[in-house]
């Protein structure tokens, strides 16, 4: 690993898993660009949290599917911190519906954020990550579980996994790792929205560890993949789900 101060970009960092990843990477010594789409107030709260703990952070607005916004996000991180060593692409969208009933406009929005957004961020990461760096994308354990109503969402995340595996091989010789984290049911606003207590309890009982994951659980996996200790892990989908089979 090189001796410079390591810097990270985290998308979707104003809330949920992205927020915890940003705070955890800062705690591990990374300067962090807190990427957000709309909630500037929440992103600035993450910056204050990082700074209060002695870290460095900046909030940068970017639509992850807009290549100009994402290029500007990387520019901002490079200007503030001198370069980019870690990209954790946590921004995502979820729409639940049966295949028969899905509004195709929702499908287009989902794919714009989850597939195009991941591709745009991965493209900039592939061009700009410094030697010793890592790209972390986010899939979902639902890809392997084939749950009804998750068809469009799971299909978009299957695309993320395919892209991640290929990019890991394309970056041969760069000393840059590329991995996907595939969380199971995790207690975030995105996950809990629209679910009644019975549904949440049923999903929490699925893992062998018999609870929902927390954003901190997932952030710990991201921190490991971003660390020197995790650098031998490359081209993998890490199913962080408490033992769902």
Image (cartoon, rainbow, N blue to C red):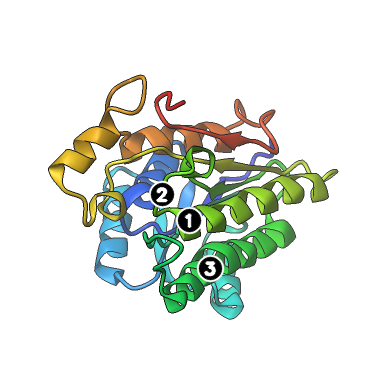
Q: Which mark is residue 151?
A: 1
Q: Report the residue that reaches farthest toward the front.
A: 100
Q: Position of residue 169 (x, y in %)?
A: 80, 45
Cα separation, mark 3 vs mark 1, equals 12 Å
Vertical arrangement, residue 177 with respect to residue 58, above or below = above
Residue 199 rendering spot, x and y as whole percentages: 22, 42
Query: Which residue does the image show at 54% across and 73% down from the upper left?
Result: 65
In primary-sequence order, the first of circles 3 and 2 is 3
Q: CA distance from mark 3 to mark 2?
A: 18 Å
The local secondary structure at tag 3 comes to helix
Task: Please tell me whether residue 72 is drawn above or below residue 241 in the rendered image.
Answer: below
Element under label 1? helix
- For the residue pair 145 and 218, the one nearer the viewer reads as 145
Depicted 106 relative to depicted 143: above or below: below
- Give SS at disc 2: loop
Of callouts 3 and 1, which one flags the residue occurring earlier in the amino acid sequence?
Answer: 3
Which quarter shows the N terminus? top right
Could you classify mark 3 by the number of other residues whose Cα lies within 10 Å: few (under 14), some (14-19), or many (20 or more)?
A: many
Label pair 3/1, CB-CB below 8 angstroms: no
Residue 148's label in the rendered image is 2
Q: From the image, tell me which residue sits under label 3.
A: 111
Q: Which sits in the foreground, 173 or 51?
A: 173
Within 10 angstroms of label 1, few (less than 14), some, or many (20 or more) residues?
some
Q: Residue furthest top?
A: 208
């Amino acid at each position: 690993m090189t001796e410079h101060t390591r810097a990270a970009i985290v998308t979707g960092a104003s809330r949920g898993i992205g927020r915890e990843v940003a705070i955890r990477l800062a705690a591990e010594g990374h300067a962090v660009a807190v990427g957000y789409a709309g909630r500037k107030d929440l992103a600035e709260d993450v910056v204050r949290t990082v700074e209060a703990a002695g870290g460095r952070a900046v909030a940068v607005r970017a639509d992850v599917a807009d290549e100009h916004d994402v290029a500007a996000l990387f520019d901002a991180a490079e200007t503030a911190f001198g370069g980019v060593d870690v990209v954790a692409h946590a921004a995502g969208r979820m729409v639940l519906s049966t295949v028969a009933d899905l509004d195709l406009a929702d499908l287009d929005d989902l794919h714009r954020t989850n597939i195009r957004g991941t591709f745009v961020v991965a493209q900039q990461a592939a061009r700009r990550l410094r030697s010793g760096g890592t790209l972390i994308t986010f899939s979902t354990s639902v890809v392997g579980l084939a749950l009804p109503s998750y068809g469009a969402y799971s299909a978009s995340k299957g695309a993320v996994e395919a892209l991640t595996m290929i990019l890991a091989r394309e970056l041969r010789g760069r000393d840059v790792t590329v991995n996907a984290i595939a969380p199971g049911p995790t207690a975030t606003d995105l996950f809990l929205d629209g679910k009644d207590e019975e549904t949440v309890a049923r999903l929490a009982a699925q893992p062998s560890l018999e609870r929902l994951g927390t954003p901190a659980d997932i952030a710990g996996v991201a921190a490991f993949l971003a660390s020197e200790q995790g650098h031998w892990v490359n081209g993998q989908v890490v199913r962080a789900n408490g033992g769902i089979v």
